[in-house]
């Protein structure tokens, strides 16, 4: 019986604890309606309370509204609370250049977590079945996936549980028919332009002719892969802690030497963990990039890039360098987009020996204001502090290992005479402090990372 089968799944994966509140995602379709009724019947056994969640995607007009009203009636009859959310998934997906399916998935999980926190629920129950698991494995295989992708849908992850994951869809339909339980069907489930629907309606029927027990076979294989994947998780987590050396809202930096210490399998998993959107082909290309020359970069999905910056790998957003010249306030703080800020201060007395890292000191009376930041220009030359002659700015930046990603940013602090300082690099010979200096200009660079 399906209820006993679900109970075994719940117990095997320790999905529920006594006294917990469970938020059930209910679309009105057969899987979610079956999940609702099964958990309702098991609620006394597990001593759990239930609350429902329904998302109106606003994609099918009146049909979507009828789905919502149907779900409301079901929860009223069961005397269970129901939370309704409505969201314009089409606009969300269009703005982010996502497929409707991907956009809907992101919104659904986001709102589920929000409602879970609002209602103090302990778990979120989703109605995925073993058929969904098969479709997911095939979809990942077609797109290119490693062990993690071929492990299928996890029965339990963080706050999310899937009590029907070992139940076939035909078992769900048989249960609903036997109990005379009504449900709604989404007509978009028959649209074969959607990859998952194409796999379900065209590909799987052909594969079932080769192996009538395909669903069970893939479920067993996925479980083995999932268990093996969990085994290496410990090594991956340790490698992540050692390899990721810096992180901010734009991206992160990986120490290539630390990452190279690990087996190729672990390296692949780390890159996949850091950017889950990557298929196996792109993961391999990122790993190849690490072996190449500094400055090489690779465009990734969602406006991200991978750039080798000497002994580090940058994974994050690609921001276009700001245009024009930025005037630097003397005696104040000037924010610099994508970098941090410059703090300047004029002093008449200073102990040179107490100069902190990130602080440069100039003779203010030898500077010709205004101070400003600009980008490099063809033919720029720069005389580093202590050297007898100037060199090409490009050579200096390469020698100072300034990432190529930042070289076109306005990181040259200048006055009317020339370049005083390369942010993140060296200072010039201009405006040197000596025994005759009466006013000192303190320049402190505050980095965002």
Image (cartoon, rainbow, N blue to C red):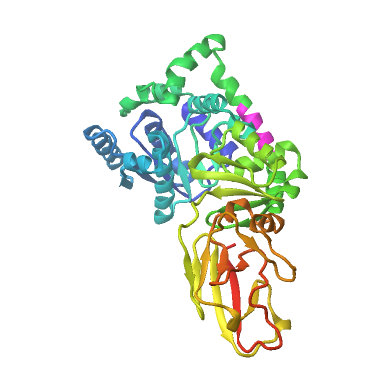
Q: Position of residue 195 (x, y in %)?
A: 44, 25
Range of the magenta residues?
Answer: 222-231
Q: Position of residue 38 (x, y in %)?
A: 42, 34
Q: Position of residue 238 (x, y in %)?
A: 71, 49
Q: Give the quarter of the image for residue 427.
A: bottom right
In the drawing, does residue 366 fall left or right of residue 127?
right
Q: Is residue 281 visible?
A: yes
Q: Give the quarter of the image for residue 394.
A: bottom right
Q: Is residue 232 visible?
A: no
In the drawing, does residue 315 fall left or right of residue 357?
left
Closer to the camera, 200 or 8?
200
Residue drawn at point x = 43 percent, y = 38 percent: 39
The outermost residue toward the left is 62
Asked if 195 appears above or below 392 in the picture, the reply is above
The outermost residue toward the right is 261
Asked if 447 appears above or below 40 in the picture, the reply is below
Q: Position of residue 110 (x, y in %)?
A: 42, 47
Asked if 255 appears above or below 268 in the picture, the reply is below
Quarter holding the C terminus? bottom right
Secondary structure mostly taken by the magenta-highlighted segment of the chain: helix
Q: Is residue 184 magenta?
A: no
How many numbered discs? 0
Q: Is residue 224 magenta?
A: yes
Closer to the camera, 122 or 425?
425
Residue drawn at point x = 60 percent, y = 44 percent: 306
Closer to the camera, 53 or 410?
410
Closer to the camera, 77 or 88?
88
Residue drawn at point x = 40 percent, y = 34 percent: 101
């Amino acid at each position: 019986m399906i209820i006993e089968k679900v109970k075994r799944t719940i117990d095997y994966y320790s999905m529920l604890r006594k006294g917990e509140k469970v938020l059930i995602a209910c679309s009105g379709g057969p899987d979610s309606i079956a999940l609702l009724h099964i958990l309702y019947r098991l609620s006394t056994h597990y001593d759990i309370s239930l609350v429902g969640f329904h998302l109106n995607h606003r994609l099918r007009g009146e049909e979507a509204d009828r789905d919502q009203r149907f779900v409301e009636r079901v929860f009223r009859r069961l005397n269970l609370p129901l939370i309704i959310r409505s969201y314009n998934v089409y606009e969300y997906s269009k703005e982010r250049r996502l497929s409707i399916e991907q956009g809907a998935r992101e919104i659904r999980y986001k709102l589920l977590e929000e409602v879970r926190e609002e209602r103090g629920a302990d778990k979120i129950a989703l109605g995925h079945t073993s058929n969904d698991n098969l479709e997911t494995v095939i979809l990942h295989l077609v797109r290119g996936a490693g062990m993690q992708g071929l492990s299928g849908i996890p029965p339990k992850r963080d706050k999310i549980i899937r009590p029907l994951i070992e139940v076939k869809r035909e078992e769900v339909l048989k249960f609903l028919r036997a109990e005379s339980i009504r449900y709604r069907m989404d007509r978009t489930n028959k649209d074969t332009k959607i990859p998952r629907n194409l796999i379900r309606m065209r590909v799987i029927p052909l594969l079932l002719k080769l192996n009538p027990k395909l669903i069970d076979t893939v479920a067993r294989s996925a479980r083995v892969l999932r268990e093996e994947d969990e085994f290496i998780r410990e090594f991956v987590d340790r490698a992540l802690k050692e390899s990721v050396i810096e992180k901010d809202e734009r991206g992160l930096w990986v120490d290539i030497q630390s990452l190279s210490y690990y087996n190729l399998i672990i390296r692949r998993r780390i890159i996949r963990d850091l950017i889950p959107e990557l298929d196996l082909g792109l993961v391999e290309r990122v790993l190849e990039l690490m072996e190449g020359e500094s400055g090489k970069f690779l465009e990734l999905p969602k406006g991200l890039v991978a750039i080798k910056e000497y002994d580090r790998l940058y994974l994050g957003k690609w921001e276009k360098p700001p245009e024009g010249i930025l005037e630097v306030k003397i005696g104040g703080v000037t924010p610099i987009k994508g970098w941090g800020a410059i703090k300047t201060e004029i002093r008449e007395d200073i102990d040179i020996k107490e100069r902190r890292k990130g602080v440069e000191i100039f003779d203010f009376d030898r500077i010709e204001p205004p101070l400003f930041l600009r980008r490099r220009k063809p033919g720029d030359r720069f005389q580093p502090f202590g050297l007898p002659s100037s060199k090409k700015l490009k050579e200096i930046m390469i020698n100072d290992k300034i990432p190529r990603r930042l070289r076109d940013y306005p990181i040259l602090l200048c006055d009317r005479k020339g370049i005083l300082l390369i942010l993140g690099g060296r200072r010039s010979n201009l405006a040197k402090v000596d025994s005759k200096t009466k006013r000192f200009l303190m320049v402190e660079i505050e980095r965002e990372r």
